[in-house]
């Protein structure tokens, strides 16, 4: 068989960019024959000029894909649901004088100026018979909202007993506990924090933070109980 009949010619048209940014069209003939492969020289090369506008577009930098270059999102301000920063919350009180006494005391050197002091004279059962409550919620909560409870507290043991306080985020009248906190108290002021995701929606006045204090003989001071909604991490 004639060798020339076993050969075939493939014509490709490719486009490339020169270093200077100019475009060039090149028509190449690639000749493939049985037993060998050769590349022929360029048959023709077309190099049309590029307008200044096209060159400017071609030379523009590509948008950054690094997430660190992305425009930061504006942080979402937390919604205050319970605000016990003012002293009226201290008026919500349950207890008998024979079991415990409470008073409002001034505080220096903290972000708050007053606290409620409760002196528990004897343990009670149930412990919630001596308690203080925050104001009820003043904003609504949606199912799936992340809630953060914070408060400041300190305590003095009596007769060497370890102070015990239970802080509870609960629905009205204690029908449901959303969050239970059992902080370790010392004689120094500390802020405590607890997070929980609400499984259901709650309306106005449906939530409150309650402190059960009747576990042991002790003197406890509590200030600035709050709850806010926070963005999910």
Image: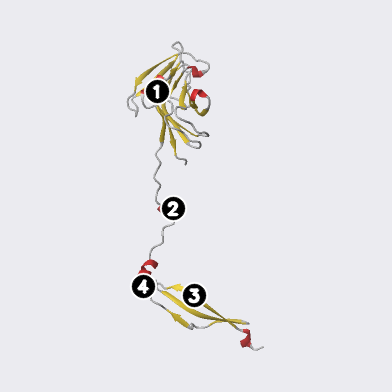
- Decide: is 231 above or below 131: below
**Residue 215 shows up from this direction:** no
Q: Secondary structure at mark 1?
A: helix
Give the residue at mark 4: 51
Query: Gap between marks 4 and 1, in whole Å?
Result: 75 Å
- The answer to which image quadrant residue 84 occupies is top left
Q: Which residue is mark 1?
A: 89
Q: Position of residue 71 (x, y in %)?
A: 39, 51
The residue under label 2 is: 67
Q: Secondary structure at mark 4?
A: loop
Q: How far apart in space, not on screen, are marks 3 and 4 (Cα)? A: 21 Å
Decide: few, some or many residues near mark 2? Use Cα within 10 Å; few <14, some 14-19, many ≥20.
few
Name the spot of residue 88 as percent of width and height, x first.
37, 22
Residue 131 appears at what percent x and percent y? 46, 19
Q: Residue furthest top?
A: 98
Circle 2: element type: helix
Q: Of all residues shown, which one is farthest toward the bottom?
A: 2
Q: Locate the N terminus and report the quarter of the image it occupies.
A: bottom right
Between discs 3 and 4, the one toward the N terminus: 3
127 left or right of 187? right
Among numbered discs 3 and 1, the one appearing first in the sequence: 3
* Crowd class of label 4 (few under 14; some 14 to 19; many from 20; radius 10 Å): few
Using the rendered view, name the quadrant where residue 229 is placed: top left
Q: Is residue 185 above or below residue 199?
A: above
């Amino acid at each position: 068989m004639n060798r020339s009949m076993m050969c075939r010619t493939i014509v490709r048209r490719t486009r490339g960019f020169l270093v200077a940014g100019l475009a060039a069209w090149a028509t190449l003939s690639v000749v493939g024959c049985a037993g060998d492969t050769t590349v022929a020289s360029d048959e023709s090369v077309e190099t049309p000029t590029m307008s200044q506008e096209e060159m400017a577009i071609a030379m523009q930098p590509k948008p950054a894909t690094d997430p660190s270059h992305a425009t930061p999102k504006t942080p979402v301000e937390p919604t205050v649901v319970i605000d016990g920063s003012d002293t009226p919350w201290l008026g919500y009180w349950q207890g008998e004088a024979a079991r415990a006494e409470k008073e409002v005391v001034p505080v220096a050197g903290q972000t708050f100026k007053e606290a409620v002091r409760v002196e528990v004279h004897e343990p009670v059962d149930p412990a919630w018979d001596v308690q203080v409550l925050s104001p009820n919620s003043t904003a609504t909560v949606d199912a799936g909202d992340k809630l953060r409870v914070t408060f400041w507290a300190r305590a003095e043991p009596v007769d060497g007993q370890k102070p015990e306080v239970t802080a509870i985020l609960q629905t009205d009248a204690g029908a449901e506990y959303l969050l239970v906190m059992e902080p370790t108290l010392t004689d120094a002021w500390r802020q405590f924090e607890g997070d929980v995701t609400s499984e259901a929606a709650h309306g106005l006045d449906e939530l409150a933070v309650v402190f059960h204090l009747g576990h042991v003989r002790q003197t406890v001071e509590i200030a600035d109980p709050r709850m806010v909604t926070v963005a999910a991490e």
